[in-house]
Amino acid sequence: MDATMKEIILVPTDFSEVCANAANQAAEAALMLGHKVTLLHVINNDTKAFLRNEKLASKSIEAKLTEIANDLKTKYGIDVDTITREGSIFTEIGEVAKDLKVNMIFLGTHGKVGLQHLTGSYALKVVTSSPAPTIVVQKRPFKHGYKSIVLPITSEAGPLEKTRWAVYVAKKFGATIHIYLIGEANEAVYQASKQIAGYFAKNNVAFTERTSEKSSNFSKQVLDYSTTINADLIMIMTDPDKGLTSYLLGRYDEDIIFNVSQIPVMCINPRRFNYEILGL
């Protein structure tokens, strides 16, 4: 966790079932982390069309957010705020996260169901524009935080941010980290994996190590392994481009994020501020 971040979890919602699941998972995490949840709805053209078709006033959006917030407060005993912004979901979610200095984002992603279609490339745009780690959630519910976390290692690039966030999450949730090294790892990647294991040991984090078989489909191996061990979170890092000013998600990342087992995926953009995580 960066020193400038506040103890806030941001949850964008379009009031769909999957966003409700994201809100519940965020509330579970907030309870264990001692954080506050902030619910966000971005009023865009989809929202305006919905309000016109249903003959509803714009204040109904705030009323719905308040209703969800009150339910979460009652169920989990946490603080919940609400906020609305007008604009594009691709820019406003990231801007709100930046303005509030949130610690993480829980993003529900789904098919063509719901007011705003946060799926496929739409969801990826939100992930890559986020100033904070984003946990992508599908419909499958997970309760009681994250206890079994898979950490795929594919390169030696940017391991520090991902490793420190892994330690942060593992300590907060009492989780075991499962290091999963790509079978075609060269010496540099192998050494990075060993350094990560050493960092976990130094910080008293439970972990296991495993190397995949050599294969051209590492994402499938990661998902098969995650399913076999009943993982409840996978952590990945986006690829930096143009000097940490933009981020790319390849086919591997998309396969992981939209996995058919619907395991939540924590996506970390390699921001410079991640080098000053509190207490690590």
Image: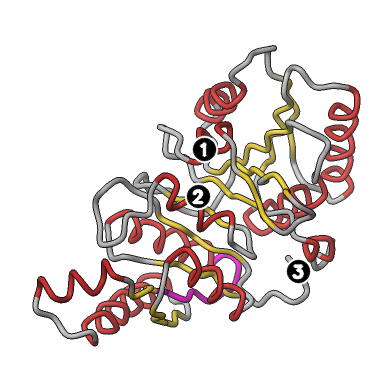
Which residues make up the magenta segment? Answer: 31-40
Q: Farthest residue toward the top? A: 214
| Residue matched to label 2 | 124
Tell me how far mark 2 sits from mark 3, CA to CA. Answer: 23 Å
What percent of the width, then of the height, locates residue 105? 54, 63
**Disc 1 residue type?**
Glu
Q: Is residue 261 above or below residue 69?
A: above
Can you tell which quarter of the image residue 200 is in?
top right
Tell me how far mark 1 sits from mark 3, CA to CA. Answer: 26 Å
The disc at residue 2 is: 3
What percent of the width, then of the height, locates residue 32? 57, 65
Asked whether residue 196 is drawn in magenta, I would say no
Q: Secondary structure at mark 2?
A: helix
In the displayed structure image, the side of residue 280 where residue 183 appears, left or right? left
Name which residue lies at 36% across and 71% down: 75
Q: Secondary structure at mark 1?
A: helix
The disc at residue 254 is: 1
